Amino acid sequence: MTATAPREEQLWSRCAGCASLLYRKRLRRNLDVCPECGEHARLAAPERLRQLVDPGSLRPLPDELPEADPIDFVDVLPYSHRLSAARASTGLAEAVVCATATIGGHPAVLAVMDFRFLGGSLGCAVGELITRAAERALDDRTPLILVTASGGARMQEGALSLMQMATVSQAIAALREAGLLTVSVLTDPTYGGVAASFATNTDLVLAESGARMGFAGPRVIRQVTGRALPEGFQTADVLLRHGQVDMVVQRRSLRGRLGALLAATSPTRASRPTRPPVPRQEPAPLREHLADAAPALPADPTPPTTPGAPAVRDAWDTVRMARHPGRPTTLDYLDSVFDGFVELHGDRLGGDCPAIVGGVARLADRHVMVIGHQKGHNTAELVARNFGMASPAGHRKALRLMRLAARLGLPVVTLVDTPGADPGVSAEEQGQAAAIAENILTLTVLPTPVLAVITGEGGSGGALALAVADRVLMLENAVYSVISPEGCAAILWPDRSAAPQAARALRLTAPDLCRLGVVDEVVPEPSTAAHDNPAETAHRLRAALLTNLLPLLDVPPAMLVRLRRQRFRRFGSTRAGVRAGAR
């Protein structure tokens, strides 16, 4: 609906779907759904909660969070100014409102996103608030309902916003393990990192009529593929036809449908198994747990200072180095770092994505499962491998190999080098967001050691789908970011020519990410870069892998999962702000 006056002062609104002029009070009585064409207008989070929950049952959860600007991001405006403006215009502390309530008499914890607040973007504070809501649901043994409305991860917080996809996913995994229902309600729009994590990895996924959901937005897909999009692309009805949601629900029926689901899945209080309270203390860090292990884990991560190492590069120069066509690929490392690689193919659902390679190999005398993105060194190889951009079949192939590794007791080593996940039309139709979300969720609970290496480009959710790990290493001239510098510049600056400036603002280099705690260790490259001496690069990577993997082999599986969850839980607003402030 469109209008010039503030919504609460409007007498009339014009429908964005059919252009009908509608009396505002009549529209409000119809839950902001056009009575002429059925267009569902976007709702603010407080109004959404009012419509969904039983009257008088709403109890907001605390939303106090410290001011956070974890990477001191500035585009044409400082990030702190954008936050202040969003808070003033919406009256909200952040882009999500969390509360306990009842729906049809059944208790639930709700986290409702608000697109008015910086496009409902997922930042550290939003991730922290949703995670706290999930932890409250776990403590109360009640279902969790997530109502999503988001453009994706918040680029002004760099890779720390990307980590929230894993943080919230592992909170959902804990509810799944406890046998508690999780439901997501997709509203318009739901894209990017939210779509590729907690919006699609819940037990049930409902879509409000007219909602759009996907990993890549329509504009990005058109720019990348140059293709016109099919009619109704990424809309709720199309998602239903492609099996990506459980049901499409009209807004007037949503509260009743949620109440019915809660009733069907909630046993009586008397029949519920008792569960001891969960202690809130955080587990000891991995380094303390392995203090007596040999070889010891590296000291606190700092950028390497090897003799003859090049001076610190400008971030944009590092981006260009990470994309160099001569840079060693996953297949190169499988030939030089590992022994006896046996490639395994297929997702067992009808596809074998060439952008993902994986199989069994040996690292020294240890058998491991290696999975990585494969680009290529020339145009023909890059095109054949889709430039390292994995399709849903690629992510599901990786998922199959991860689960196989867990059953066989093999550690998992992932090699990440991708500009991002495949943003094409067919990828969206085949469930790209859900495929990434399932990988992230599975990695948070995988009962075997996981070691990830960012070898070139670590692009957004496509990278994180292989990088939820116990230890994350990064080659000296690699990059890891929530969005490409060009994409960030196109959104926040006047044009793409500001990509070098965006690269610096995003804090995407290995030293930056070490300081932020996203990466545990930087693997130094020889001379000017890896492509100058691939053999020496492979030697150094092999040594770093052994140093970091061997201690993990002695950690019990339950402890591995617990410590991995602690690793990503710390990327909330409070902890991230403290870590960044320490810089």
Image (spheres, rainbow, N blue to C red):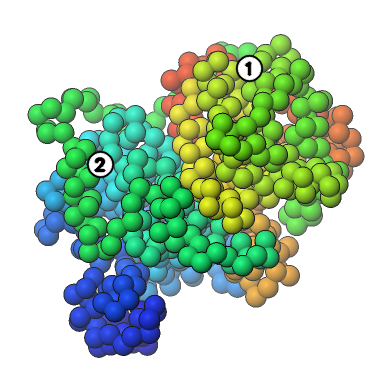
Image mark for residue 154: none
Q: Is residue 391 above or below residue 453?
A: below
Q: Marks 1 and 2: which is nearer the front?
A: 2
Mark sitting earlier along the chain (1/2): 2
Find the distance from the CA under tag 1 to the CA under tag 2. Answer: 39 Å
25 to the left or right of 532 = left
Q: Is residue 180 above or below residue 122?
A: above
Residue 542 drawn at (x, y percent): 75, 24
Picture quadrant where residue 305 is located: top right
Residue 489 drawn at (x, y percent): 65, 66
Residue assigned mark 2: 143
The residue type indicated by label 1 comes to Leu
Residue 352 drawn at (x, y percent): 65, 36
**Nearer-the-camera pick, 224 or 446:** 224
Residue assigned mark 1: 550
299 to the left or right of 182 = right
**Nearer-the-camera pick, 157 or 439:** 439
Residue at horizontal 29 percent and vertical 79 percent from the top: 36
Residue at horizontal 64 percent and vertical 23 percent from the top: 369
Name the secondary structure under disc 1: helix
- Asked whether residue 288 is in view, the answer is no
User: The N terminus appears in which quarter of the rendering?
Assistant: bottom left
Classed neighbour count for the residue bearing mark 2: other residues with Cα under 10 Å, few (<14), some (14–19), many (≥20): many
